[in-house]
Amino acid sequence: MAAERDTAAQEPADPQPDGAARAGLLIDWGGVLTSDLFSSFRDYCLRVEIDPQTLRGRFGSDPAFRELLIALEKGELQEDEFERQLGPLLGVEPDGLIDGLFAGVQPDVAMVEAVRRARAGGIRTALVSNSWGVHRYPHDLFDELFDGVVISGEERMRKPSRRMYELGAERAGVAAELCVYVDDLPFNLAPAEEMGMATVHHTSAEQTIPELERLLGLALR
Ligand SMILES: [Mg+2]
């Protein structure tokens, strides 16, 4: 009978016995599909001879740094203006500051391949990223990897705004409860979890990929 024909062969991968497979993958860019941002920031600080702890600490707790960062991520502040304001706070040359901070950031080949395989296996995918300017992203790669893209500087809002995650699910074309969300910053996972998404706190491809294989019911390596 036609209904029975080749259904097993059409299964994208081995569904896991310990839970229903998710149908959508929403994923962060910086620090998840790339190498660690903070190690690139640290290298920059060492190059320009400022204390790496100062940079990281002040983005976490200094209101002037926080305001600049939030405005940049929401696209309210242009990159050159951000650099012009941040440079003096750090005591560094503003020109090329963002490029300098991101100089050591490379795509994480294993993670990129996992997303590619997930999509090829029938999982709907979307990027959900807070941006430091929108032109550094590899847009060609995004066409290949994602059904939808949500970039904070284009949406005029940022994670952890719940709407960012809703847009991700909408653009992936999957109900939020059927999505997995991956981020390297734990506080960005909270809204996704509240919306019923499975969440993965990314620290390394070695840990994240097996977890995604389990959640999506697909081989991703
Ligand atoms: Mg990140």
Image: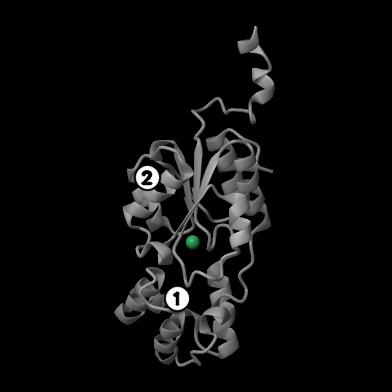
Mark 1, mark 2: which one is toward the viewer? 2
Between the C-alphas of marks 1 and 2, the distance is 26 Å
Query: Which residue appears at 58% of the width and 74% of the height?
Result: 40
Residue at the spot of label 1: 56
Residue 108 at x, y = what percent? 64, 59
Query: Which residue appears at 49% of the width and 69% of the height?
Result: 134
Q: Is residue 169 left or right of residue 141?
A: left
Q: Which residue occupies the foreground of this view, 13 or 135?
A: 135
Q: Quadrant of residue 199?
A: top left
- The reply to whether the C-beta atoms of the residues labelled 1 and 2 are less than 8 Å apart is no
Q: Farthest left residue?
A: 63
Q: Residues within 10 Å of mark 2 (few under 14, many from 20)?
A: some
Residue type at numbered disc 1 = Arg
Query: Which residue appears at 33% of the width and 53% of the height?
Result: 163
Q: Quadrant of residue 156?
A: bottom left
Residue 106 at x, y = what percent? 64, 66
Quadrant in which the C terminus is drawn: top right
Secondary structure beneath dot 2 equals helix
Secondary structure beneath dot 1 equals helix
Q: Which residue occupies the foreground of this view, 155 or 66?
A: 155
Q: Is mark 1 within 8 Å of ligand 1?
A: no
Residue 193: assigned label:
2
- In the displayed structure, would residue 148 be above or below residue 120? below
